[in-house]
Amino acid sequence: MKGLKEKLYDKIEEHRPRIKRLLKEHGETVVNEVTVQQIIGGMRGIKSLVSDISYLDPFEGIRYRGYTLPEVFEKLPKAQGSEMPCVEGLFYLLLTGDIPTESQCSDVIYDMVNRRQLPKYVYDVIDAFPNNSHPMAILSAAVMSMQRESVFNLRYHRGMNKQDFWDPTYEDSINLMSKLPVIGAYIYNKLYSDKGCNYQDPTKDFGGNFAYMLGKEKPYDDVSRMYFIIHADHEGGNVSAHTGHLIASSLSDVYYSVSGMINGLAGPLHGLANQEVLRWIQNLKEQFGNRLPTKSELQKSVWETLNSGQVIPGYGHAVLRKTDPRYTIQREYSLKHMPEDELFKYLDLLYEVVPPILQEQGKAKNPWPNVDAHSGVIQWHYGVTEYDYYTVLFSIGRSIGVLSNIIWDRALGYPIERPKSITTHMMEQIVGIGS
Ligand code: HAX
């Protein structure tokens, strides 16, 4: 049976002629036009990137390789004795488009276990950070410090055929992905915990080993698998995925790219929103003397947040126009495993209160909750109460999609990215303002 890399090679060979044909026969076909609003407004909705790893429909939500999230959770092989699938199986799916068998999934687990060992200097880099540093800054630096390990970089400088770029990129990607949970766990233990450990369990998969290193009992292993899977990809244009792709397009190796994507994810309008949600809910709780407020009390607080010029964290989205299915999956998990959780009850009340208020305010195009509205509450339930840390979990998950995209970018020879900017004066001339 072919391993993941051989299978990927076949898929790449099948796919290359499709891109060649599109370029050769339809290179001048117009896909969409661009408005002034889109140019000023963060390029919203302009179709100008290709990714076959995932696609985000505004009303349906994300599909990974054509599968909805419930389908992904149903079809991927499960970790032994667990409800949730193995992250390694997701990586197989994202790379090849095929659902792996149990044995194909086990092969990837075996390969990744053998690549988990962190070089000693990475621990030193992490240890050198003061304890009041943000964990995302530490994570980004730890990844960056490993750039010297890049196989792509080494082989590029020795001289390599363009057609082969994907191969060392694949090696770098699996090496880095295997190490990210180890880095994440070490950061957690350094900053917050004396219960976790710095030893790994080679019998455990990606999510299981992460939970083990954090010192968490079942079902936290499943929570980790669920988190890493739902955060893995959200098509190509979001800040983290796009940053990873953009950096890699100059043939910077994946250590540069993933460190950059982590920096993009660390903004409160993107991945850091999960930390902001918890901060906001904790403030509300304090305000209400630790009791669940009434609906009208909560409505008043939501309006106060909006009227003070702040956003409601965890609500709204640049593409989605309905409740994020990643939110729904976490809600279903919570209904099953932690229905009586106090913060979950807060969340449910917010779900009732916030959308009508955002609709009444009339600014946000999407009044519904996104993935970040829910993720912190589950972490809190299982004792990960240090909300600064939540975006590290997001980063580990997001790296799976970003790296899959970069491997394919290299396989299909996508060029260095270089959109065109124009000046305000030029835009005024285009629309006929002034001389
Ligand atoms: N609360 C208050 N106002 C909001 C809002 C919210 N949750 N969401 C959007 N708006 C406002 C915008 O700030 C904007 O106001 P101005 O016209 O005054 O600038 C207006 O509504 C229109 O914005 P939009 O077109 O609906 O949304 P954008 O595409 O510009 O931005 C964001 C999308 C996700 C950044 C936005 O909805 C937001 O700030 N949400 C809160 C932060 C958040 O949850 N971020 C995580 C998003 C998911 C993600 O990427 N996870 O990583």
Image (cartoon, rainbow, N blue to C red):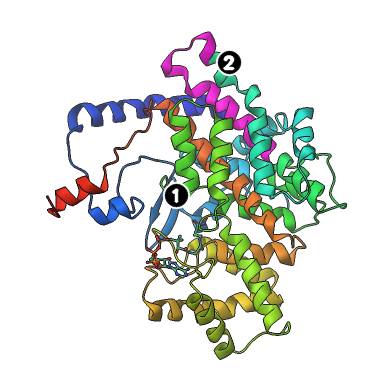
Q: Position of residue 92 (x, y in %)?
A: 55, 38
Q: Nearer the viewer, residue 182 or 428?
A: 428
Q: Quadrant of residue 187?
A: top right
Query: Residue tagged by mark 2?
Result: 154
Residue 14 as seen in the image, left or right of residue 3: left
Q: Position of residue 13 (x, y in %)?
A: 39, 24
Asked whether mark 1 and ligand 1 are closer than 8 Å, the reply comes as yes
* Label annotation for residue 394: none
The part of the chain drawn in magenta is: 156-180
Vertical side of 142 occupied by 189: above or below: below
Determine the quadrant in which ligand 1 lies: bottom left
Q: Position of residue 343 (x, y in %)?
A: 68, 74
CB atoms of marks 2 and 1 within 8 Å: no
Q: Is residue 82 visible?
A: no
**Badge 2: how crowded within 10 Å, few (<14), some, or many (20+)?**
few
Q: Amino acid at mark 1?
A: Asn
Q: Nearer the viewer, residue 433 or 26?
A: 433
